[in-house]
Amino acid sequence: MTDARPTPAPAPAPALPASRSMCCRARAPSRAAACLRRLALTLAAVVLGTSVTAPAQAADPLPIADAHIHYSHDAWDVVPTAEVIGLMRKAGLRLALVSSSDDEGTQRLYQAAPALIVPSLRPYRSRGEISTWARDETVVRHLEERLARYRYAAIGEFHLYGADADLPVPRRLVQLARQHNLILHAHSDADAVERLFAQWPQARILWAHAGFERPEAVRAMLRRHPRLWADLAFRSEHGSGGKVDASWREAFVEFPDRFMVGTDTFTPERLYYIPEHAAWARAWLTDLPIDLAERIAWRNAQALVMPVWQANRAQAQETQPPAGSADAKAGATVASGATVSAGAASARASAIGCADPGAGGQRLTSARAELVFRTTPARIAVGQRFSVLGTVCPRQAGAVLEDLHIDATMPEHQHGMNYAPRIVRQGSGDFRADGLLMHMPGRWQLRFEPRIDGRPEPLLHELVLR
Ligand SMILES: [Zn+2]
């Protein structure tokens, strides 16, 4: 992952039931390998009898508020929304602070379980923006567009380090948080946290992963900033083997109201880990006095998040257009059936990033556009006609998709196809291209060239035909 994580793999090995292999669903080879390693660890733990589920308890299990959940675009196929909610219920979650890249995943979960999910707005539209967003001005438009449409309790989780916190885009993010009464969920070093407070002294900052700092450094920050809270997501050294580490215990006792737990589902497979994380947290929390355990388990998160969320949600009921109104449907109406050619009617699309392309679909991303597509037949064969069905989504609200060209070339041979595809636009950025044919084996580039606001925005998809 691109997240900067000083501790390479500190999460406790999940105690998975053998029937729920996380690996079988992983598609990317690297992910599958990581998954196999994790499964091996899990199996080793089971064989050695060291699995880390909570001890059987007579009373109801301690509720958990999970302050660090993501449900990003590449998770929707792997774990459907209803299954995520099921995992949260199985985990005994009382609330879940959710943020996703893009925000659509958060909205899906919120629609499915509005009493459980508390939405937080990430500045990311897709994976890979973690290290670029602070210098990407289109992020501001994305945030403004979502804030105009939905309500949130927080803004984040965002990744921000040192002096980058004072760049124009992060400054604008802080202003928006202030304007919309939002908690800042910052994956940051102490320096960036200081800079955020300097910009907005009344900010409420939830420090993701407690900054991956040692407990002494976390305490120093909490002492300095009464409006700083810390989640313990993706860390395990504070409570391994059902025991709380001595230094961390001192931190928890000194600041009983400021810590909370979280899973950090930064890959799709980690969603399956939500119940195991909750059980693991309950196990180490039993080593604390019950009052303190309850605060860290859920009361602190609830006390931080719910007043903000309730205030913002109440405002939403006053100001948001009802579902189905013209405003709610904005972006869904454009000329349909227009053949794309010179002079074709332009479409004003307000989409920021495309929806999930579904199983077998592809997603291409560039600075100004996203494009999702699938082919029929799904597998392209030499000498066989195929069609491409897809959607172009300009990434800036209000950007105009004027035109679309599709071609395929063989870079090594400097030639394209022998046929020109017929392209038909079918709706808001939707298109269908028929009559494509790749006439020889080798490396091909399928080239999509939407023209947006007068400039071409090429997107390439490579494939090798044998
Ligand atoms: Zn995270």
Image: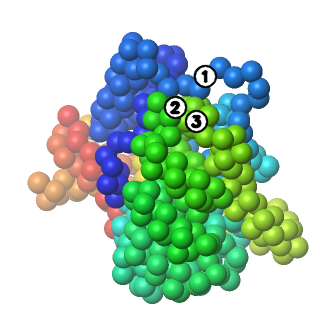
Along the viewing direction, whichever of 231 and 417 lies nearer the viewer: 231
Q: Could you tell me the amino acid type at mark 1?
A: Pro
Secondary structure of the residue carrying numbered label 3: loop
Instruction: Determine contact: label 1, label 2, CB under 8 Å.
Output: yes
Taking 404 as reference, is 319 left or right?
right
Image color mode: rainbow
Residue 381 percent across, percent down from the top left: 30, 35
Q: Position of residue 253 (x, y in %)?
A: 59, 53
The residues tagged by marks 3 and 2 sit, at their Cα atoms, a distance apart of 7 Å
- Residue 228 placement: quadrant: bottom right
Question: Which amino acid is tagged 2?
Answer: Gly
Q: Does residue 215 appear to the left or right of 327 in the view shown?
A: left
Could you tell me which residue is drawn at 13 percent across and 59 percent down?
A: 414
Ranked by sequence position, the earlier of labels 3 and 2 is 2
Residue carrying label 3: 287
Q: Is residue 240 left or right of residue 278?
A: left
Q: In the rendering, at what x and y percent does residue 237 appear?
A: 42, 43
